[in-house]
Image (cartoon, rainbow, N blue to C red):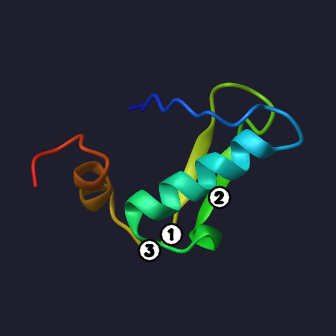
Amino acid sequence: GSLKIRLTAPPVDGAANAELVRFLAEVLHVPARAVEITAGHSGRQKTVRVLGVDRAAAAVALGLAPA
């Protein structure tokens, strides 16, 4: 599946990517180093890997599943 996240950081010099990593780390309660953009660094669609959180817990944290 996919998730749409709107960021306020401009897509300049990696600012939007850094903001996405920071946002996901905060919401998923993991360190920023656990969040990795694996594809789409320069595009609007990205693939992200998050270490230290399973899919079900991530869905709950992101509001995609009931707690």
Q: Which quadrant does the C terminus fall into?
A: bottom left
Percent x, y for residue 11?
78, 31
Q: How many marks?
A: 3
The kind of residue tagged 3 is: Gly
Q: Which of the two labelled residues, at mark 1 and mark 2, occupies the earlier sequence position? A: 2
Q: In the image, which disc is placed on residue 36?
A: 2
Q: Which residue is mark 3?
A: 52
The kind of residue tagged 2 is: Glu
| Quarter residue 32 falls in | bottom right
Q: Residue furthest left?
A: 66
| Quarter residue 12 falls in | top right
Report if the CB atoms under discs 1 and 2 are less than 8 Å apart.
yes
Q: Residue furthest front?
A: 8
Report if the CB atoms under discs 1 and 3 are less than 8 Å apart.
yes
Percent x, y for residue 26?
46, 62
Q: Secondary structure at mark 3?
A: loop
Q: Residues within 10 Å of mark 1 (few under 14, many from 20)?
A: few
Q: Which quadrant does the N terminus fall into?
A: top left
Percent x, y for residue 4?
46, 28
Query: Could you tell me which residue is drawn at 52 percent across and 29 percent down?
Result: 6
| Quarter residue 42 falls in | top right
Q: Which residue is mark 1?
A: 51
